[in-house]
């Protein structure tokens, strides 16, 4: 997975004295006996591109709608820029929201759609015209100013909705699955544009998505949600390399999971017996783990390598290739172990049309480094 956002040492969430622009304090939202959001506390900082990620029904959209003022929490408080906005209506919050449907006015031109909120705020005409011109240029649709929404492609309508949402210069922009209606190539291109626009304006973006790759690509940080609660809040790289729970490991990317029990731990090296793998597993992990403790070892497919021969050392196992998926840049192999457990590993396809040394039914020996895997206790 790639990340569009440049690596930066500027991490306001890591500075204790840095005040967040959004503070969600123990917020719950219940619909009858169902808890869509269950006691969530979360801080989001100024200038972040923050993603609420999760499967359908996890509560991410409900949380976004409470931020926007379209839903009222059953309990808990929401603060924006130090002000309690829990009971403040949407139009009085320093935020704007871009809906998944784009919600453009069909009878208005592109320019009129962008100007709508500014007119409602009674912005003077000269200033309004200049702001609309700025927004058209920002999303590169100057030539479409006089068209109606039905005369635009899906990608163009998405740009108009973004320009309208940004026209009032909100402190925070909320985006509800904004790229869901776009095809894959256009979606990837628009991800670049959104990140560039957010970087240029410095506005805090909070986006809801079920697409893990989209969140990994665009975000400064991600909150992974599950059943109304937060599983993990972290940077994309740390969430991928160091998932906090089995759910996080499974949801973000592909992963091999081996259940087992701790045998011993010495100098941050943990020896784990796993009947699933058919061998002992060795993991470098600094968290204190007691002998006999039930744990899960997580290994990403790209960390697994093919060896010439099986060794008796930990993290060495063998099996038979049962499935191969060719994805162009990489091939994914599914190997069945003698225990019946299936393991995935990947290989890059560096040379075009090169003869593949691995094929169906072939026995292979697999291994990985103790520093390339992790221990999950939740």
Image (cartoon, helix red, strand yellow):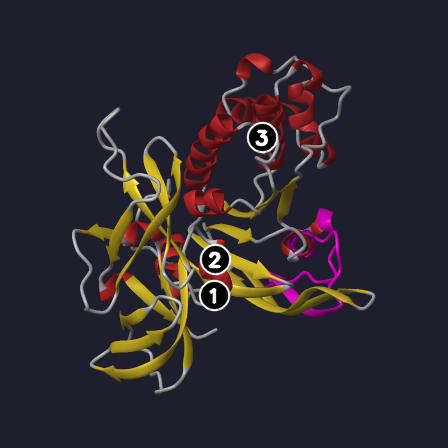
Whether residue 230 is situated above or below residue 187 in the rendered picture? below
- Image quadrant holding the N terminus, namely top left
Furthest residue to the bottom? Answer: 291
Quadrant of the rendered structure where residue 114 is?
Answer: top right
Q: Position of residue 289 (x, y in %)?
A: 35, 83
Q: How many marks?
A: 3
Bounds of the magenta segment:
63-91
Q: Gap in Å between the C-alphas at discs 2 and 1?
A: 6 Å
Whether residue 61 is situated above or below residue 35 in the rendered picture? above
Residue at 62% from the left image edge and 36% from the top image edge: 165
Whether residue 95 is situated above or below residue 164 in the rendered picture? below
Q: Nearer the viewer, residue 32 or 51?
A: 32
Q: Gap in Å between the C-alphas at discs 3 and 1?
A: 39 Å
What element does badge 1 sit on?
helix
State left or right for residue 377 relative to residue 21. Answer: left
State left or right for residue 27 relative to residue 22. Answer: right
Q: Badge 3 is on which residue?
A: 163
Residue at 36% from the left image edge and 42% from the top image edge: 332
**Residue 244 belongs to the span the image colors magenta:** no
Tags 2 and 1 in contact by the CB under 8 Å rule?
Answer: yes
State left or right for residue 46 relative to residue 155. Answer: left
Q: Badge 1 is on which residue?
A: 246
Furthest residue to the right? Answer: 32
Q: Gap in Å between the C-alphas at discs 3 and 2?
A: 36 Å
Q: Badge 2 is on which residue?
A: 250
Are there few (<14), some (14-19), or many (20+) residues within 10 Å of tag 2?
Answer: some
Are there few (<14), some (14-19), or many (20+) residues within 10 Å of tag 3?
Answer: many
Q: Earlier in the sequence, mark 3 or mark 2?
A: 3
Residue at 35% from the left image edge and 66% from the top image edge: 277
Q: Nearer the viewer, residue 374 or 73?
A: 374
Quadrant of the rendered structure where residue 6 is?
Answer: top left
Is residue 287 visible in this depiction of the protein? yes
């Amino acid at each position: 997975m790639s990340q569009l956002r440049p690596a930066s040492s500027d991490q306001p969430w890591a500075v204790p004295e840095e005040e967040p622009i959004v503070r969600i304090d123990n917020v719950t939202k219940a619909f009858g006996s169902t808890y869509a959001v269950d006691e969530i506390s979360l801080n989001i900082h100024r200038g972040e591109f923050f993603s609420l990620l999760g499967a359908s029904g996890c509560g991410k959209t409900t949380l976004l709608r409470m931020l926007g003022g379209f839903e009222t929490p059953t309990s808990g408080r929401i603060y924006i820029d130090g002000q309690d906005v829990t009971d403040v209506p949407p139009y009085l919050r320093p935020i704007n929201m871009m809906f998944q449907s784009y919600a453009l006015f069909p009878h208005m031109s592109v320019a009129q759609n962008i100007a709508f909120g500014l007119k409602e705020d009674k912005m003077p005409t000269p200033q309004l015209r200049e702001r609309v011109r700025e927004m058209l240029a920002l999303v590169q649709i100057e030539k479409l100013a006089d068209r109606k929404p039905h005369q635009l492609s899906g990608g163009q309508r998405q740009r108009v909705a973004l320009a309208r949402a940004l026209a009032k210069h909100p402190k925070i922009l909320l985006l509800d699955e904004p790229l869901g209606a776009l095809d894959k190539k256009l979606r990837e291109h628009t991800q670049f544009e959104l990140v560039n626009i957010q970087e240029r304006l410095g506005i805090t973006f909070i986006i809801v998505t079920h697409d893990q790759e989209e969140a990994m690509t665009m975000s400064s940080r991600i909150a992974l949600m599950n059943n109304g609660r937060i599983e993990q809040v972290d940077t994309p790289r740390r969430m991928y390399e160091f998932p906090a729970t089995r759910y996080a490991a499974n949801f973000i990317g592909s992963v091999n999971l081996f259940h087992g029990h701790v045998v011993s731990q010495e100098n941050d090296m943990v020896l784990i017996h796993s009947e699933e793998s058919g061998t002992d597993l060795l993991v470098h992990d600094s968290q204190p783990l007691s002998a006999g403790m039930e744990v899960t070892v997580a290994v990403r497919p790209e960390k697994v390598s093919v060896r010439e021969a099986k060794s008796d050392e930990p993290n060495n196992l063998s099996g038979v290739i049962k499935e191969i998926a060719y994805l162009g840049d990489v091939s994914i192999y599914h190997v069945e172990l003698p225990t019946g457990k299936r393991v995935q590993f990947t290989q890059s396809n560096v040379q075009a049309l090169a003869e593949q040394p691995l094929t169906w039914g072939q026995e292979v020996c697999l291994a990985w480094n103790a520093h390339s895997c992790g221990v999950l206790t939740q």
